[in-house]
Amino acid sequence: MTTMVRVGRRYLPRGWAHLGLQIAIWFAFLGLYQLARGVADRDPARAFQNGLRLIDFEQGANALWELTFQRLALSSHWLGTVASWTYWNSEFTVVGLAMLWVYLRRHESFVRFRNTILLANVLGLVGYVLVPTAPPRMFASFGFVNDHRDGLVALAANPYAAMPSLHAADALIVGVTLAIVVRRPLARLFWALWPAWVWFCVMATANHYWLDVAGGIAVALIAGGLIQWHASSRRVEATAQA
């Protein structure tokens, strides 16, 4: 126990209790995600109808770009594998590790980072409940290829969570935050390019339409704007009370 206390004092900015609180907040969100998923899963017919509407819109605009991106990814085993890996890990794995790193190494930026991620995801969950949407990979008749293992999808993901793309939203928030707080130029460049790479991958794996990506970007910008506005309001109040 003494060793654990020493480790907490040395490496954790605010001790084990505060770290435990952050983990509890994260798992509470995962529970909320599963609840929203259960609601969305109840109406697959509506989800497919919404997916067809997006495809019809993009076809009408001659902008069904997801097929082009997927063909490009499938033309190379290496590119297809990396795109698939990115899709599966860019959400909870990369987001979780990024949040942990910021918590430990750039703690002054953590609260805003965490709150922006959480707010963007809550907004996305509202979209999943109100507008469940089947992803492109469920429409083989249009030429999309479904490379997913159905059991893994059923276990880990909401199958009708195309609009908006939280992969796109979280990649933008993570990329911008880390590009600002890291110090090495190559790391900054990597994280600055990270959102665009994830956006390509979610379309190349036929998990999202480009309209989903646009929706995810909008969600990230709204969340970031609201968190910034709240922080600014608190600073003004603190100054007025001083």
Image (cartoon, rainbow, N blue to C red):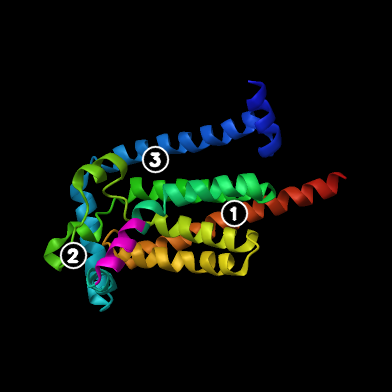
**Three-letter code, disc 2:** Phe
Q: How many marks?
A: 3
In the drawing, does residue 95 fall left or right of residue 46? right
Label 1 neighbourhood size at 10 Å, few (<14), some (14-19), many (20+)?
some
Q: CA distance from mark 1 to mark 3?
A: 21 Å
Q: Nearer the viewer, residue 58 or 102?
A: 102
Q: Circle 2 is placed at which residue position?
A: 144
Sequence-wise first label, 3 or 2: 3
Q: Is residue 123 visible?
A: no
Q: Closer to the observer: label 1 or label 2?
A: 2
Q: Is residue 122 visible?
A: yes
Q: Circle 1 is placed at which residue position?
A: 226
Sequence-wise first label, 1 or 3: 3
Q: CA distance from mark 3 to mark 2?
A: 27 Å
Q: Closer to the observer: label 3 or label 2?
A: 2
Q: Where residue 58 appears, x then y in whole percent? A: 27, 72
